[in-house]
Image (cartoon, rainbow, N blue to C red):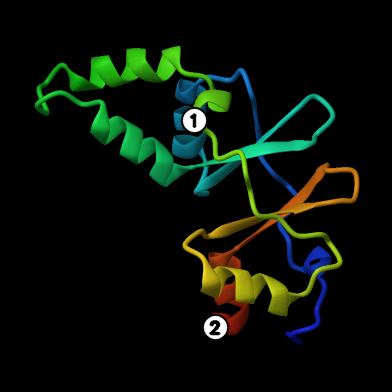
Amino acid sequence: MKRDTPLSELMTTNLVTLRARDTLATAEDLFEAHAFHHLPVVDEQGHLLGIISKSDLYLLSDRMTLFRAEANPDHNDRFFRSLFAEEVMVRQVVHLAPTATLEAAAALFRQNKFHALPIVDATGRLRGLVTTFALLELACPD
């Protein structure tokens, strides 16, 4: 794959998303049902509002767990049902346009500690997602 390949040719477009008022329990269920690690949060028109990672949920679960007692799963379940995506999502999400290149995405991944880049059109609508895993698959296909 060439460095100047547009992200529109690489991005995942079949996305599962959350709405701002979906609970973290919904996010947890989606992470358990699918083999992905990032859930974009969008409004009714599909505009990107934020993103939640599986790591974000793990951190919340660990921080809110008291003494690692047997009752913690119930405590975490109640806690996750009480929080909305908008309360914990990362709001200032680095994103790129579909016309941005593979090289631009790789540079952002190298410079930062995140592993997913939402691809957003000129109106702010989410069009896809590129992950470090996808780039690794390109570099080292089976």
**Residue 64's spot in the image, x, y percent?**
26, 26
For the residues carrying marks 2 and 1, which lies nearer the camera in this image?
A: 1
Tell me: residue 61, above or below residue 138: above
Residue 130: x %, y % from top left = 66, 61
Disc 1 secondary structure class: helix
Quick one: SS at disc 2?
Answer: loop
Residue 44 placed where, x, y %? Answer: 80, 24
- Give the quadrant of residue 102: bottom right
| Residue farthest front in this picture | 92
Is 14 left or right of 106, judged from the image as shown? right
Q: From where the camera sits, is residue 130 visible?
A: yes
Judge by depth and name the residue closer to the eye, 94 or 126: 94
* Quadrant for the N terminus in the image: bottom right
Q: What residue is shown with label 2? A: 140
What amino acid type should be assigned to the residue bearing mark 1? Val
Residue found at the far bottom of this picture: 2
Q: How far apart are marks 2 and 1 (CA)?
A: 34 Å
Looking at the image, is 46 positioned above or below residue 8? above
Crowding near the residue tagged with mark 1, few <14, some 14–19, many ≥20 C-alpha atoms within 10 Å: some
- For the point 40% across and 20% down, the residue is 80
Left/right placement of residue 75 relative to residue 134 reads left
Let me know if residue 40 appears in the view. no
Q: Is residue 68 above or below residue 112?
A: above
Q: Is residue 24 above or below residue 137?
A: above
Q: Residue at x 9, y 26 (%)?
A: 67
In this view of the protein, which residue sits in the foreground, 114 or 16? 114
Q: Residue at x 44, y 30 (%)?
A: 28
Q: Which residue lies under the disc numbered 1?
A: 88
Residue 55 position in % (x across, y down): 40, 46
- Mark 2 vs 1, N-terminal side: 1
Circle 2 packing at 10 Å, graded few (<14), some (14-19), many (20+), is few
Q: What residue type is labelled 2?
A: Cys
